[in-house]
Image: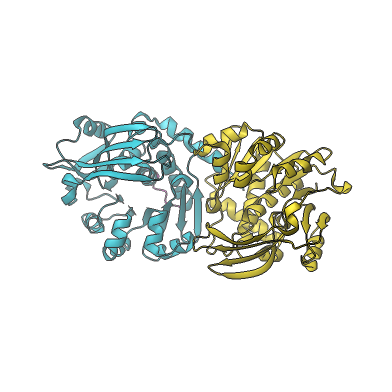
Chain colours: A yellow, B cyan
């Protein structure tokens, strides 16, 4: 099954303890699509300016990412410049220019309307809802959001969540959204808002999933070097949703496998600046690391 | 096999968001012994004053904990008073009186000398070493320590570590000991100091084990309520070491099972103030939660 994603497409400049990279492509929709493209065809919805590198657009298409939904508009592409600290969980935004992303109104080409697997990356919940409205019959809907929308657009977000199956947020966002500090209580509250599945990203500690009464936790892959954490959460979501779209298996076991594939993709992207590592990745690398996740977590077979 | 533990025995008073408890028994050796006693006979080494409750000593003995190594000396038992914040990972020490623990010099009764499974809970590394010297042939030696000894007694600690097989410390201590922020590099450094197995406690995120090239990670059990975190790390160590002593299985699979049993014990003790939950626990509770850990983490069987 093809997988639709809507979100930001950007040009980033990143400083980190291990070095720096200027003007690398980024944005949630781009990271998501690259990670997802190893599993299933992707349909991307976003906006870029004429400054966005042509060769990267060609590379995305070569990887089975449909760009019919990526508008080009006059003006600069969304640009972000950031610096990660020695503790890479902490970052400062040095510069931000929304450019053409500032008045982004996602418009789906007719060829996208039959998409059944959909991921709404972090944008205004009103725009996320408008994407769902343009679809004929979305079946598996994943969604991300951020502190800003939780604090400033709670009514729109809560309305949207009634139509979201799988919410993928980090622990801080989960606390803010639920107004609960304890993760179990927080999850119970959020699952009452609409989603049947909640995936909480805990950075270097991995992912915890709540679905009904079932809980699944997988650690992050222990890496000697985290070069650039940008895009880790988006690659997690891309690998997760794309494995679901590929397999069509949303059983508890299918969800667990998809969560591990998502964790695999998140673990790779941080190994180099921007999406560089993804562009060199092979399917064999992915499957090898999947098995390493099994070894990392396996207690015993029942 | 019996399991020897040396460490603090205390009387604690605890305030936490969910309530308070005054004058409950505590201390690393006590928590360790109580947790371990569900798996194997325990030999305890410590010191108490005449104010330590007699009925608790009788209760420990009833549970198969040998108190021949617990001295009674004139003076107050070690007393600690602390307050946990809304975020239970943060605590303030409100009052501390070392009492008879201040000049504790562990002296093993002859009946303890043949102990092969040993845990050196957090005390001065010079005293930890003196315990090993009093043993005929310790085979499996576990050890805890704390920031204070790493900063103030590094030479003695490094000397001790050459004779320690399994080091059980938290992530902050691991960073301080290794002078490395990254957990994988930190572990590699520490494994060069002597221990063949390193267990890093990550609080609400669980445990990560490094042994040679092998890594195993297990999340903490997701609890709706953490009433009192006191003793969680000691109960982890108690369950872990005692399952090893019981099974005699220090293979990679045996270690993983022991780590999960340790995690089970750590998850129970925090459910109530002091050791109350442990005193009500049954072996069936333990095995049920062990299976819940398997369900929580199981990806798929290879």
- Residue shown at the point (37%, 55%) measured from the top left: B166
Q: Nearer the viewer, residue A93 or B122?
A: A93
Q: Is residue A274 above or below residue A248?
A: below
Q: Nearer the viewer, residue B97 or B9?
A: B97
Stretch of the chain drawn in magenta: B245-251
Q: Nearer the viewer, residue A129 or A141?
A: A129
Where is residue A79, by image quadrant?
Answer: bottom right
Q: Nearer the viewer, residue B293 or A169?
A: A169
Do we see residue A209 in this rendering?
Answer: yes
Q: Is residue B246 covered in magenta? A: yes
- Residue shown at the point (41%, 45%) measured from the top left: B89
How many marks are shown on the rendered structure? 0
Q: Looking at the rendering, in which quadrant would you find the N terminus of chain B? A: top left
Instruction: Locate residue A132 relative to residue A284 in the image: left or right.
Output: right
Q: Is residue B30 above or below residue A58?
A: above
- Residue shown at the point (72%, 51%) measured from the top left: A7
The x and y percentages for residue B133 are 22, 58
The x and y percentages for residue B137 are 27, 56
């Amino acid at each position: 099954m093809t997988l639709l994603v809507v979100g930001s497409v950007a040009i980033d400049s990143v400083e980190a303890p291990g070095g720096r990279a200027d003007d690398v492509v980024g944005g949630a929709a781009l990271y998501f699509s690259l990670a997802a493209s190893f599993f299933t065809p992707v349909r991307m919805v976003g906006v870029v300016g004429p400054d966005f590198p042509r060769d990267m657009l060609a590379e995305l298409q070569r990887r089975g990412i449909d760009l019919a939904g990526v508008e080009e508009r006059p003006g600069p592409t969304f640009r972000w410049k950031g610096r990660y600290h020695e503790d890479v969980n902490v970052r400062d935004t040095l510069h931000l220019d929304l450019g053409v992303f500032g008045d982004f109104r996602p418009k789906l080409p007719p060829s996208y309307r039959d998409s059944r697997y959909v991921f709404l990356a972090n944008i205004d919940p009103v725009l996320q809802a408008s994407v769902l409205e343009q679809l004929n019959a979305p079946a598996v809907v994943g969604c991300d959001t951020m502190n800003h929308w939780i604090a400033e657009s709670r009514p729109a977000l809560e309305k949207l969540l009634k139509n979201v199956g799988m919410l993928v947020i980090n622990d801080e966002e989960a606390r803010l959204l639920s107004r609960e500090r304890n993760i179990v209580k927080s999850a119970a509250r959020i699952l009452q808002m609409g989603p049947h599945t909640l995936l909480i990203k805990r950075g270097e500690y991995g992912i915890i999933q709540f679905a009904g009464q079932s809980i699944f936790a997988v650690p992050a892959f222990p890496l000697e070097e985290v070069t650039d954490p940008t895009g880790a959460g988006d690659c997690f979501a891309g690998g997760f949703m794309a494995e679901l779209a590929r397999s069509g298996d949303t059983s508890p076991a299918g969800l667990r496998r998809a969560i591990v594939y998502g964790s695999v993709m998140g673990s790779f992207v941080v190994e180099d600046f921007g999406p560089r590592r993804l562009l060199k990745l092979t399917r064999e690398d992915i499957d090898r690391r999947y098995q390493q996740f099994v070894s990392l977590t396996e207690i015993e077979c029942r």
